[in-house]
Amino acid sequence: MIVILKQNPDQEQLNGLLRWLEAQNIEVHPTVGTHQTILGLIGDTSEIDVDLISALDIVDNVKRVQEPYKNANRKFHPDDTVIRVGDLEIGGGTMTVIAGPCSVESEEQIIGIAKAVKKSGGAILRGGAFKPRTSPYAFQGMQIEGIRLLLKAKEATGLPICTEIMDASQLPLFEDVDILQVGARNMQNFSLLKALGKTRKPVLLKRGMACSYQDLLMSAEYILAGGNTDVILCERGIRTFETYTRNTLDLACIPSLKTLSHLPVIIDPSHATGKSALVPSMACAAIAAGADGLIIEVHNDPPHAKCDGPQSITPEAFDKLYRRLDAIHRAAGEEI
Ligand code: PEP
Ligand code: MN
């Protein structure tokens, strides 16, 4: 349920309402927006009398929220959420490009790619240290050493870093990581999501390959319910009957998720297509469709990459692509 307040509500009446709701075991999440203040009510609101609250002088409107996701719901928070990472802002009309290799392979590799990504305009460095591989015999990532090398690349370039966390027990190792990535295979690892809800670090939450928008938003809800407000939703392709591409990129998720939720939406054209040749067009399409950013795999030597070489673009291709993305983003902004 949401309670929309009138402008400049009488403080005494408001405190009275808040006390009364508390006594009914209802948690209140206030959102002060540009045009209105909204109280999001969480708990069993079935016994709350809508007419009683609507009749208060300070109340403009009361609506029941049918969807099971509350904190993630646009109705609870009409303005876009903007997530701050250092000086960067993710969401709210900006374009944030996260780029880097699928996995960290060596100091030379990650620092070299980080420098190239920064030079082209990339804002955040990606690189897997702990890799969720389908085969237990495949390269599992450099693990702790990978995190250490990412931090070295951050020091060398000033780029914030984004890397995947696979288990809550790894949290102490991620203390200096700027964005915690939850992979598609872990989107419904609820104990991990609960642990991330207790942190105050931005979380990049990837959509599971067989999960609906509502499943994704419910996973985001786990993190938000813990008090962490900084969740970035990421579409990385879903499983369909098509086999030409690695997955099927669902670009309709951009306007859909933005209608349903206030959280930033970014697109991963690399895992979505599995083919480097398809990455630029899908990246451009995502920005044209209103995505808040992208996460793109960039490798200096794709044929010899330890992981996901066929979908990785070179630093040169990334440079060219970034210029196109920038132009599309500007044009889309003007149109709006
Ligand atoms: C990745 O970003 O390298 C990755 C493993 O992605 P996903 O979880 O989307 O498969
Ligand atoms: Mn990958």
Image: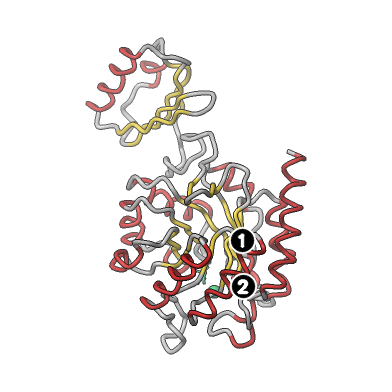
Residue 35 x, y percent position in the rendering: 54, 24
Q: Residue at x 40, y 32 (%)?
A: 40
Q: Residue at x 77, y 46 (%)?
A: 331
Q: In the rendered view of the protein, which quadrant contains the C terminus?
A: top right
Q: Is mark 1 within 8 Å of ligand 1?
A: no
Residue 157 x, y percent position in the rendering: 53, 65
Mark 2 secondary-structure assignment:
loop
Q: How is the image coloured?
A: secondary structure
- Return the residue nearer the eye: 293 or 48: 293
Residue 179 x, y percent position in the rendering: 45, 58
Mark 1 secondary-structure assignment:
loop
* Residue type, mark 1 in image: Gly
Q: In the rendered view of the protein, which quadrant contains the N terminus?
A: top left
C-beta proximity under 8 Å, tags 2 and 1: yes
Taking 167 as reference, is 241 left or right? right
**Cα–Cα span, label 2 and label 1:** 11 Å
- For marks 2 and 1, give the one nearer the viewer: 1
* Residue type, mark 2 in image: Val
Density class for disc 1 (Cα within 10 Å; few <14, some 14-19, many ≥20) is: many
Q: Residue at x 45, y 63 (%)?
A: 181
Q: Which residue is mark 1?
A: 122
**Residue 298, label in figure:** 2
Q: Is residue 41 above or below residue 293?
A: above
**Residue 260, label in figure:** none
Q: Is residue 82 above or below residue 45?
A: below
